[in-house]
Image: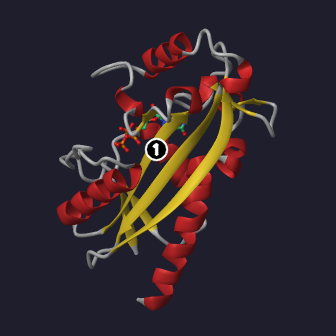
Amino acid sequence: MQIVLATHNKDKIREIKNLLTDLPVEIKTFEDFPEMPDVDETGATLEENAILKSNAINEYTGLAALADDTGLEVDALGGQPGVYSARYAGPGCSYEDNCNKLLEELKNVSVERRGAAFRTVIAITWSEGDVETAEGIADGIITSSKQGVSGFGYDPVFYYPPAGKTFAEMTLDEKNKVSHRGLALLKAKELIKTHLKNI
Ligand code: ITT
């Protein structure tokens, strides 16, 4: 079976590929489909956006498509930036712009109130067009300055208490074992294994 990853985010592709290596599936990306569209994320929830992306790329390629929609939900901001995590600091912003804006917004917030969660919803649209989803959550604390250079996005400001460090201070394997995306993909792998048995 072939599965195409419905994303243009190379950092996500690196993490997802690393987690799917032991499955008997061939992973395709936008590099195999250079004209693959960037899907507008017009949904109100991570689940809606993940399904929008997996459906659109399934229709475009005719293959099973796997999409990831992820948000950082910060308690002191009422769950924001959430679905707007990619463009939190404005259109065309960088990862660094987003981290800086978050640190600025929280600069007067005490450590007890800096709780946050990364949430990922994975949607898989099978080649026949039906969809299944899986969710993963990681709980952490927003730091008061950036720490670490691995990972991507908000990883330098996301402290993960069980490891005693930020996601950006972890290796890819360490992060994947406990992260929102890692946990969602663990469930998605079960969906893929069941699907493989039934085709
Ligand atoms: P696609 O829609 O093409 O998949 P995207 O970057 O737009 O890529 P999202 O809509 O899911 O992805 O946006 C989520 C943003 O949240 C992303 O741009 C990063 O800034 C951040 N993010 C996602 N996963 C993350 C992770 O594991 N660690 C840190 N930040 C992450």
Which secondary structure, mark 1? strand
Where in the figure is residue 56, as x and y percent of width and height? 22, 58
Label 1 CB less than 8 angstroms from ligand 1: yes
101 left or right of 43?
Answer: right
Q: Is residue 34 visible?
A: yes
Q: Does residue 150 sit above or below 58 in this rendering?
A: above
Residue 37 pos. (x, y %): 19, 47
Q: Position of residue 146 (x, y in %)?
A: 63, 16
What amino acid type should be assigned to the residue bearing mark 1?
Thr
Instruction: Please give the name of the residue rendered at 78% of the width and 35% of the height, measured from the top-left corner.
Output: 161
User: Which of the 4 quarters of the picture holds residue 60?
Assistant: bottom left
**Nearer the observer, 33 or 186:** 186
Q: Quadrant of the C terminus?
A: bottom left
The figure's colour scheme reads secondary structure
In the image, what residue occupies the spot 52% across and 10% down? 104
Quadrant where ligand 1 appears: top left
Residue at (65%, 25%) from the top-left corner? 114
Instruction: Name the residue that disc number 1 marks.
Output: 70
Quadrant hosting residue 189: bottom right
Q: Position of residue 43 (x, y in %)?
A: 28, 48
- Mark 1 closeness class: few <14, some 14–19, many ≥20 residues within 10 Å: many
Q: Is residue 172 visible?
A: no
Front position in the image: 74 or 131: 74
Residue 127 versus residue 180 in the image, above or below = below
Residue at 38%, 69% in the rendered image: 2
How many dots with numbers?
A: 1
